[in-house]
Image: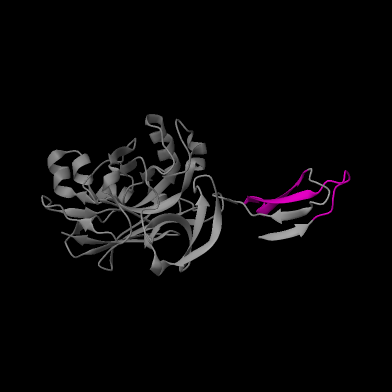
């Protein structure tokens, strides 16, 4: 912690220097506050207060029996205190990525998924362009983090990958306007909307075919300050690229989806909106490795096991 002396003001009171982040002006805006202290007490302390508005990659991780939130910086993750949804401080502690296990970056109250949003995926299914989003819920029990296995269900015949961009809600949202919607988004992460394709066709609904335990890989981090209309979404199966899409080709933008879905239900901090998959969906088998990669976020990697 750094201490320094400041001149007293005209009324002989010491001044306190507080640094507040403001990314739209400069890295830190400076505010001078005057306090009344005893005559001899004029040693001041400088503190940097971080806000989630600063561009960051947030990670949630496990280390030595405890779960932490941190900021991912290259080959290290730096522990933070406070809330990633409000204000937080970056602590001195940092850990090599090889010493931590990444978890799902949030624990949401709900996962909202959108189908039929990329135009090439709509075309490969032979469906018309929808007038409104087609959405469904996945259970939080479907979520797994990076490197955790997707379990091939005993009753499954065909299990497909569906690589997607997911938005993470920052603050409580209900009936928000489309033009204000992105203010309610903390950042973005990768999602794999794993699907039992045969059940989708036979039963004509998605809750069972997409709701199996482990059918919701999420991660590896939450990246802030991305333009959700300018991102490339790719999926790789055993190292081979099998999907590639550009978010500018989505029928419904992230902003519209937040607006539309908040008309129906209240969105809470940490809730997930997955925005649909591009064309190229296909099956996986036990022993495969599936990876979802999104610009500015990184790669979500999961093995398939029986």
Pinpoint residue 231: horizontal percent, then vertical percent. 43, 55
Does the magenta portion include 296?
A: no
Q: Quadrant of residue 251?
A: top left
Q: Check the picture and name the quadrant holding the N terminus.
A: bottom right
Residue 74 is at least partly visible in this image: yes
Q: Which residue is drawn at 33% across and 47% down?
A: 276
Residue in the foreground of this view, choosing between 4 and 290: 4
Q: In this rendering, is residue 252 above or below 228? A: above
Pinpoint residue 208: horizontal percent, then vertical percent. 19, 42
Magenta region: which residues? Answer: 6-35
Residue in the foreground of this view, choosing between 289 and 45: 45
Residue in the foreground of this view, choosing between 93 and 101: 93
Pinpoint residue 104: horizontal percent, then vertical percent. 36, 53
Pinpoint residue 247: horizontal percent, then vertical percent. 40, 51
Q: Residue at x 32, y 56 (%)?
A: 145
Q: Colour mode?
A: one colour
Residue in the foreground of this view, choosing between 92 and 104: 92
Q: In this rendering, is residue 169 above or below 223? A: above
| 118 with respect to 31 (left or right) | left
| 1 with respect to 119 (left or right) | right
Q: Residue at x 14, y 39 (%)?
A: 203
Does the magenta portion include 32?
A: yes
Total count of labels = 0
| 196 with respect to 269 (left or right) | left
Residue 232 is at least partly visible in this image: no
Q: Residue at x 33, y 41 (%)?
A: 112
């Amino acid at each position: 912690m750094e201490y320094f002396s400041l001149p007293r003001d005209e009324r002989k009171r010491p001044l306190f220097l507080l640094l507040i982040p403001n990314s739209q002006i400069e890295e830190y805006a400076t505010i001078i506050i005057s306090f009344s202290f005893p005559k001899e007490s004029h040693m001041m302390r400088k503190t940097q207060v971080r806000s989630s508005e600063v561009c960051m990659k947030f990670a949630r991780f496990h280390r030595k029996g405890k779960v932490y939130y941190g900021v991912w910086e290259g080959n290290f993750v730096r522990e933070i205190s406070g809330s990633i949804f409000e204000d937080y401080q970056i602590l001195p502690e940092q850990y090599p990525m090889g010493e931590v296990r990444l978890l799902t970056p949030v624990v949401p109250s709900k996962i909202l998924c959108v189908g039929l949003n990329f135009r090439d995926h709509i075309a490969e299914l032979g469906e018309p362009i929808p007038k409104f989003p087609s959405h469904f819920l996945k259970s939080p029990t479907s979520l797994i983090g990076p490197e955790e296995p997707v379990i091939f269900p005993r009753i499954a015949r065909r299990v497909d990958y569906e690589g997607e961009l997911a938005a993470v809600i920052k603050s409580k949202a209900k009936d928000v306007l489309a033009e204000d919607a992105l203010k309610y988004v903390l950042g973005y992460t990768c999602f794999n909307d794993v699907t039992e394709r045969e059940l989708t066709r036979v039963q004509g609904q998605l809750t069972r075919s997409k709701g199996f335990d482990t059918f919701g890989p999420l991660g590896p981090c939450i990246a802030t300050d991305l333009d959700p209309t300018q991102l490339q979404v790719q999926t790789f199966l055993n190292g081979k690229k099998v999907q590639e899409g550009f978010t500018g080709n989505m029928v419904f933008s992230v902003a519209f989806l937040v607006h539309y879905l908040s008309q129906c239900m209240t969105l809470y901090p940490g809730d997930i909106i997955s925005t649909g998959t591009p064309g190229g969906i296909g099956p996986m088998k036990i022993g495969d490795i599936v990876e979802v990669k999104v610009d500015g976020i990184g790669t979500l990697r999961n093995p398939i096991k029986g």
